[in-house]
Amino acid sequence: MQYKDTIATLLENACPSIQYRIRKEILGQSPTDRVLTSLQASIIEDDLVKKIFSWQQPDGWLGRDFHGFESIETGIRVLAEKGVNKDHPVFSRALDALENGDDRLHLGIGKVGMILDDLGFGGSQRIRAAVFSYANAEDRFIVKGEISKTLKCFSAVPGVPSISEITEEFDARKVFKPGVLWPDVYALRLLAFTQEWRSQENIHLIGEAIQRLVELSPIPDIYVRYKSQWMAPGSFAMHDINPDMAMMDDQSWMVWFHRMEMFARLGIVATIPILSDQISFLRSILEEGEGFFTKPLSHYFFHTWGTYSGLRLEKDWRSTKRRTYDLTFRSLLILHYTESIIGSTKKYTKKPGFLRL
């Protein structure tokens, strides 16, 4: 990847989390290197990290809930995004608490999570598996099983002729017909942050599914019906995969950054022309900014960390430079994963236990 001068500027001036993640993820440096060890010490002094640490209860659980703003889901997501080493005592105890916390999975989500699980959508168990994946903890017992279910959801997408064929009207809303499987944002995240499912066949499958989602975009709100009730699956970032990027507002940009990073990590961007075009648009913005993303974006979706929102790693964006560093880092991360995975599927071999074509 180019942008050497951009990276050099970020390594000198950006916050410790951005510096750490550039060195570890983009440059491939070992977490045990002296510089990264020093940055880790600075990261755990970050105000937001210390706030998440303060949420920890005696049994290791973070926050009040399983799902929501002050929840173990949000807490682990923040720690992973900030670059906290998963072996840190607070982080590792939180992961253990999540693995053993079956009796708390209803907190912040209620019975909806269990019902969505039973119907094959992303409920509490898929959310839990995705949270483990944020921390690169795919060895936890639940992750493999949820990956298999998630691949089945994606495998259903290429054969969908239209949204009307898989939905019906209920209580003035579109709901999925009985038996329909459909991927949500947690399905996308779970596969993006895990590795063992990857084979040429599975990656091809995901590429076909994403291509069909592009063709079906924009996708309306679709709910899940259970008896006489309806409930919303995690459709954040999954509605319009083919937006007019020249017309996107600040909120749409946050959603785009989030979704495109997942696509880049999946290794399917180069196989889908629309996504390749979006990457070219991103490059044009960086070129205009001489290697930096200078578009003046600002929306609470960037600033507020929760289960869906939050991308800002810098302390605040009152400084134009800090905002630019954050958005440039996200851009470079997307370009890195887009380019580093291109052509690399040849290294993937078939692995037992996962769906393949």
Image (tube, rainbow, N blue to C red):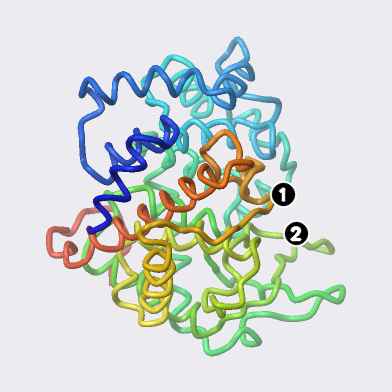
**Residue reaching furthest right?**
171
Query: Whole-Å distance between the Cαs marked 1 and 2?
Result: 7 Å
Label for residue 171?
none
With respect to residue 43, does 29 lie above or below?
below
Residue hosting label 2: 231
Please provide percent x and percent y for residue 143. Answer: 41, 43
| Occupied quadrant, residue 175 | bottom right
| Residue located 58% across and 74% down the image | 240
Describe the element under mark 2 as helix, strand or loop.
strand
Category of crowding for the residue at label 1, using alpha-carbon neighbours closer than 10 angstroms: few (below 14), some (14–19), many (at least 20): some
Category of crowding for the residue at label 2, using alpha-carbon neighbours closer than 10 angstroms: few (below 14), some (14–19), many (at least 20): some
On the question of residue 137 being in view, the answer is: no
| Occupied quadrant, residue 332 | bottom left
With respect to residue 145, does 273 lie above or below?
below
The amino acid sitting under disc 2 is Met
Apparent side of residue 207 relative to residue 31 in the rendered image (left or right): right
Quadrant containing the C terminus is bottom left
Q: Are marks 1 and 2 in contact (CB under 8 Å)?
A: yes
